[in-house]
């Protein structure tokens, strides 16, 4: 009987220790999972500095300058994005459609220059109305998808252009084919409940990367991080992260989940 009891106690203690050890290992594994870095292109970790646009993309080895034979401007994109665009551009050209990048990456400081120029232009409006006016088509610094090197503007910055015969042909080609190359129109019509910026037929986002950055942005960035430019106090009043940063099309949101 004593032998049986001793065996039972030994077995119980052994099982308990094993269970406790497993639980601790599981807890440690989960803790490790939480701190694992989210990676951007070329296995570099996504950081707050990156998604806020406060870095020099010209010195970042995940970015590349667009070939000068396609543009007379200095335009940078992430390498993966540019490679996919070139494939899309070639496919479009076969069907008689020309796609030209007119704007690519803009960091915080470049976006700040655009924002503050428009802020001065609308000086007669109240701060809230000034911000709302600019936000029809331009982002506050630290909230632009152009910071990430994943978003590009194509052919024209006027919606009316895409109603012309040539522009409509280009737009319809993009609607039919751009998704095959990872590009999505994120600022569509606002008649389906989308908030934020107005319709931008020219703005296309490379979601295989951009969706990762938006998830990181929502997990790590707060309204307090949107600062250091004229009118930045309006970020909280207008709730720009919910209304504008996440004011994207249903298709883009579906790819972000």
Image (cartoon, rainbow, N blue to C red):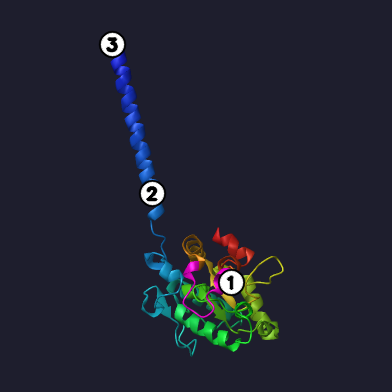
- How many numbered circles are shown? 3
Q: Which residue is mark 1?
A: 178
Q: Quadrant of the N terminus?
A: top left
Q: Sequence-wise, which precedes: disc 1 or disc 2?
A: 2
Element class at badge 1? helix
**Position of residue 147 in the picture relative to residue 240 (left or right):** left
Q: Extreme top residue here? A: 1
80 relative to 250 in the view: left or right? left
Residue at x 40% of width, y 51% of height: 33
Q: Position of residue 203 (x, y in %)?
A: 58, 76
Q: Residue at x 47, y 72 (%)?
A: 148
Q: Is residue 245 above or below residue 6?
A: below
The answer to whether residue 149 is visible is: no
Is any part of residue 75 visible from this angle? yes
Q: Secondary structure at mark 3?
A: helix
- Residue that numbered label 2 is attached to: 31
Q: Nearer the viewer, residue 171 or 202?
A: 202
- Residue 53 figure quarter: bottom left
Left or right: 45 in relation to 123: left
Q: Position of residue 20 (x, y in %)?
A: 35, 34
Q: Which stretch appears magenta?
A: 224-237
């Amino acid at each position: 009987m004593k032998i049986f009891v001793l065996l039972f106690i030994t077995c119980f203690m052994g099982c308990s220790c094993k269970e406790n050890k497993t639980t601790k290992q599981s807890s440690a594994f989960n803790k490790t999972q939480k701190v694992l870095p989210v990676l951007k292109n070329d296995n570099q970790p996504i950081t707050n500095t990156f998604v806020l646009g406060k870095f020099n993309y010209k010195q970042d080895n995940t970015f590349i300058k667009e070939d000068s034979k396609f543009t007379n401007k200095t335009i940078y994109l992430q390498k993966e994005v540019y490679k996919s665009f070139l494939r899309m551009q070639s496919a479009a050209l076969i069907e008689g459609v020309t796609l030209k990048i007119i704007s690519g990456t803009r960091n915080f400081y470049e976006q700040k220059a655009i924002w503050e120029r428009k802020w001065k232009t609308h000086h007669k409006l109240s701060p809230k109305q000034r911000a709302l006016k600019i936000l029809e088509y331009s982002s506050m610094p630290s909230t632009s998808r152009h910071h990430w090197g994943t978003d590009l503007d194509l052919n024209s910055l006027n919606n009316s252009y895409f109603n012309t015969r040539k522009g409509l042909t280009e737009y319809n080609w993009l609607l039919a084919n751009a998704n095959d190359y990872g590009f999505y129109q994120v600022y569509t019509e606002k008649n389906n409940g989308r908030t934020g910026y107005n319709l931008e037929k020219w703005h296309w986002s490379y979601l295989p990367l951009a969706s990762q950055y938006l998830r990181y942005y929502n997990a790590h960035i707060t309204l307090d991080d949107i600062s250091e430019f004229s009118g930045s106090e309006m970020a909280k009043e207008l709730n720009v992260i919910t209304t504008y940063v996440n004011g994207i099309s249903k298709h883009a949101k579906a790819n972000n989940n």
